[in-house]
Image: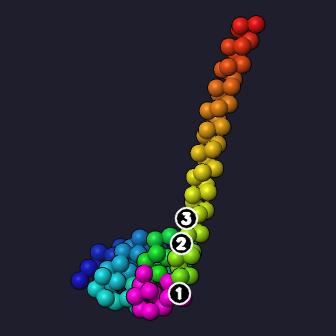
C-alpha cells in the first residue's frame, strides 16, 4: 500500500498539506475515491488556495459521478490560476516598466550631454 510515508508525515505535522494531498493521491490510485476526497477536503481546509487539491478532488468526484461537485472544483481551480496569472502578469509589467524607465533616464542623460 502507498500510504505509509504520507501517514508518517501527517503524524509528524498534522498541517502538512502536501502529505494529505499525497495520501489522497495514493488512495485515489488504489480505488478509494471517497477516502481521497476526505484527504483533499483536509488540504482545502488547511489551505484554500492549494489549487492541486481542487483538481484532484474534482477528478475523484467525477469518477464517483458527482459531475456538479467536479465542475465546482474545476471552476475554483481556474479562479486560483487566474489570480496567480494576473499577479504574474502585473509583476512582469512592473519589471518591464522599471526597465523602460531606466532606458528613458539614460536617453535623457545622453540628450542632455548632446545639448
Query: Residue at (23%, 83%) from the top-left corner?
Result: 1
Q: Is residue 69 magenta?
A: yes
- Horizontal side, residue 48 vs residue 110: left or right: left
Q: Is residue 19 visible?
A: yes
Regarding mark 1 in the picture, which secondary structure is present there?
A: helix
The quadrant where residue 40 appears? bottom left
Horizontal and vertical percent for residue 101?
68, 31
- Residue lying at 33% horizontally and 76% vertically, measured from the top left: 6
Alpha carbon of mark 3 to alpha carbon of mark 1: how far? 19 Å
Q: Earlier in the sequence, mark 1 or mark 2?
A: 1
Can residue 11 be spotted in the picture? no
The residue to which callout 1 is attached is 69
Q: Are marks 1 and 2 in contact (CB under 8 Å)?
A: no
Main SS, magenta residues:
helix
Mark 3 and mark 1 residues within 8 Å of each other at the beta carbon = no
Identify the residue under disc 2.
77
For label 3, the residue is: 81
Hey, which quadrant is residue 37 in on the image? bottom left
What residue span does the magenta drawing correspond to? 59-70
The answer to whether residue 96 is magenta is no
Q: Is residue 50 left or right of residue 97?
A: left
Mark 2 neighbour density, 10 Å: few (under 14) some (14–19) many (20 or more): many
Residue drawn at the location 57% of the way across and 76% of the way down: 75
Measure the C-alpha gap from mark 1 to mark 2.
12 Å
Instruction: Give the x, y percent position of residue 14.
Output: 44, 77
What mark, if any, has residue 109 been given in the picture?
Answer: none
Amino acid at each position: 500500500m502507498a500510504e505509509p510515508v504520507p501517514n508518517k508525515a501527517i503524524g509528524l505535522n498534522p498541517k502538512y498539506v502536501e502529505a494529505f494531498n499525497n495520501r489522497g493521491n495514493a488512495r485515489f490510485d488504489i480505488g478509494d475515491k471517497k477516502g481521497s476526497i476526505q484527504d483533499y477536503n483536509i488540504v482545502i481546509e488547511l489551505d484554500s488556495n492549494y489549487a492541486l487539491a481542487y483538481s484532484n478532488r474534482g477528478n475523484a468526484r467525477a469518477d464517483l459521478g458527482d459531475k456538479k461537485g467536479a465542475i465546482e472544483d474545476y471552476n475554483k481551480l481556474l479562479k486560483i490560476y487566474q489570480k496567480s496569472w494576473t499577479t504574474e502578469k502585473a509583476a512582469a509589467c512592473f519589471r518591464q516598466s522599471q526597465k523602460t524607465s531606466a532606458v528613458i533616464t539614460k536617453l535623457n542623460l545622453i540628450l542632455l550631454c548632446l545639448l
